[in-house]
Image (spheres, rainbow, N blue to C red):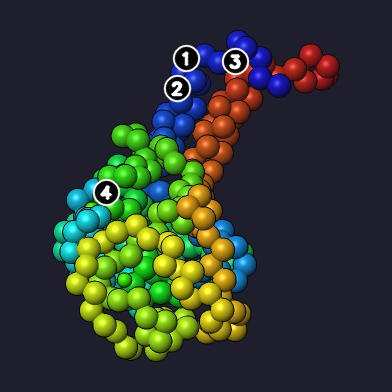
Amino acid sequence: MLHPRSFTPARLTVGAAALALCATAGAAQLTLNVTVENLAPSNSISFAPLHLGFNNGSFDAFNSGQTPTAQIISVAEGGSGSAWHPAFAATDPGATRGTIAGRLDSGQTRSATFQVDAQANPFFTFASMVVPSNDFFIGNDSPTRYRLFDAAGNLLLSSIEQTAADIWDAGSELFDPAAAAFVGNNNLRTPQNGVVSANFAELAGFDGLPTAAGYVFTSGLAADTNVYRIRFEVVPEPGTYALIAGGLLAVGWSTRRRRPPSSSVVSA
Ligand SMILES: [Ca+2]
Ligand SMILES: [Ca+2]
């Protein structure tokens, strides 16, 4: 019902100011919903809790071809990340870190929300143990591999997918089904004294073994088999809705108030 003549510069300014405030309020601090999915074939690999951080790109937990660090071993052997989180916090105190808890079996999905400063922490880093295994994990080698946000805080990536070829052997513990998490005694271990390297083929060595989840393991993996997906979705802030509604109300109120009273023509 707004007549074009209603939009005087003054009234446009009211609405524009409210909308500009929305953009400023939503640019840096935002709520991000993160969903993880196990895409592996049924009865194949499961994943331990996902450890993650929105960060400035300075925390590098491991390097392919090099001796594994204590922080990545704490993810790869047992899944806890007990050394990964403190090392992350020490390197990048301003990062938002967290964990999406629970074992993730084939076909399962889990979600969690995080408060993220998209301008200060545009990068995403993650690590999760692959089970069954002695010391296998997924995670980004380069801390700047996944830039989630542009300089203005807009989401650049909606999802990250991992294939079997992205699975790492930490090189810290020798392959041994009897000492492997999920199919053996995770408290046992024999040092491998190796380096971090891509390795999914060794998982077939667990074929036929009963898992802690009750199913009999069958790897069924090829290099290009999708095994994991992480999805990102910005959650609109209630305050953003309030500001937009406030801006529209201000324009509407201003327009209505200045419209000549048509009822005066027919009264009296
Ligand atoms: Ca690295
Ligand atoms: Ca190993």
Q: Amino acid at mark 3?
A: Ser
Residue 34 or 257: which is nearer the viewer? Answer: 34
Which residue is disc 2 drawn over?
13
Which residue is disc 4 drawn over?
142
Q: Is residue 112 visible?
A: yes
Q: Residues within 10 Å of mark 3 (few under 14, many from 20)?
A: some
Q: Is residue 6 above or below residue 61?
A: above
Query: Quarter of the image holding residue 67?
Result: bottom left
Query: Quarter of the image holding residue 220?
Result: bottom right
Asked if the residues shown at circle 3 and circle 2 are in contact, with their CB atoms under 8 angstroms apart, the answer is no
| Numbered marks: total | 4
Which residue is disc 1 drawn over?
9
Q: Amino acid at mark 1?
A: Pro
Which residue appears at 32% of the width and 44% of the height? Answer: 145
Q: Which mark is residue 79?
A: none
The quarter of the image holding the N terminus is top right
Which residue appears at 46% of the width and 18% of the height? Answer: 10
Q: Amino acid at mark 4?
A: Ser
Query: Which of marks 3 and 4 precedes in the sequence?
Result: 3
